[in-house]
Amino acid sequence: MIGLLKKRVLVKKETKVPNGRGGYSTNEIEVGQRWAAILPMSSRELGQFMQKEKEADTRIVMRFDQDLDTSCVIYYKNNRYRVDQVIDRLDHSDYMELITRREVI
C-alpha cells in the first residue's frame, strides 16, 4: 500500500466565518501536505454513487489522519477534490479512503 502513495497533495479545511451582514463566508485553513494515491472510481462504484445522487468520481487513499473529514478540500496540480465521504479501512487501519468529487480550478 505504501508504494501507491506517490502524489504530494495539499489538504485544506473549509470553515465558515460570519461576514458581519448576517451571512457567512468560507475560509480555507491549511492542514498540511500529505502523500496520497489518487484513483479513479470504477464504473460499478460510479453507478452506486449516482443512485445515491452523489457526484463522487475519485478515491483518494492516504495515511489515517483524524483531522480529515468532509469539510476538507484536497489540492493536486490544477484540481480541487471535495471530500464527500471518509471511509475507515478496516483491513488496513493505518490508511483511510476519501470519496471525492473533482473540480478543475
Image: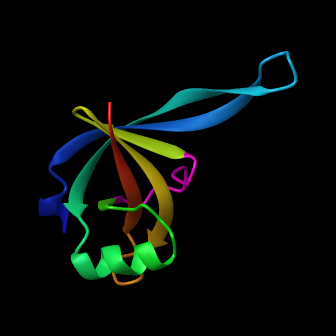
**Residue 89 position within the rendered picture, expressed as x and y whole percent measured from the top left:** 40, 76
> Which residue is found at the position 19% from the left and 69% from the top?
1
Q: Quadrant of the C terminus?
A: top left
Do we see residue 45 in this rendering? Answer: yes
Seen from the viewer's position, the closer of residues 34 and 48 is 48
Q: Is residue 71 above or below residue 28?
A: below
Q: Tell me, yes or no, whether the highlighted magenta stretch contains residue 70.
A: yes
Q: Residue furthest top?
A: 20
**Residue 82 position within the rendered picture, expressed as x and y whole percent measured from the top left:** 45, 48
Q: Is residue 103 above or below residue 25?
A: below
Seen from the viewer's position, the closer of residues 78 and 54 is 54
User: Start and end of the magenta stretch?
Assistant: 62-71
**Residue 41 position within the rendered picture, expressed as x and y whole percent measured from the top left:** 26, 69
> Which residue is found at the position 85% from the left and 17% from the top?
21
Q: Is residue 18 above or below residue 79?
A: above
Secondary structure character of the magenta stretch overall: loop
> Which residue is found at the position 12% from the left and 61% from the top?
3
**Residue 74 position within the rendered picture, expressed as x and y whole percent measured from the top left:** 38, 42
Q: Specify whether 21 is left or right of 5.
A: right
Q: Tell me, yes or no, whether the highlighted magenta stretch contains residue 50.
A: no
Q: Indicate how the structure is coloured in the image.
A: rainbow
Would you identify the image quadrant in which residue 94 lies?
bottom left
Q: Specify whether 43 is left or right of 73.
A: left
Do we see residue 89 in this rendering? Answer: no
> Which residue is found at the position 35% from the left and 59% from the top?
63
Q: Specify whether 43 is left or right of 63.
A: left
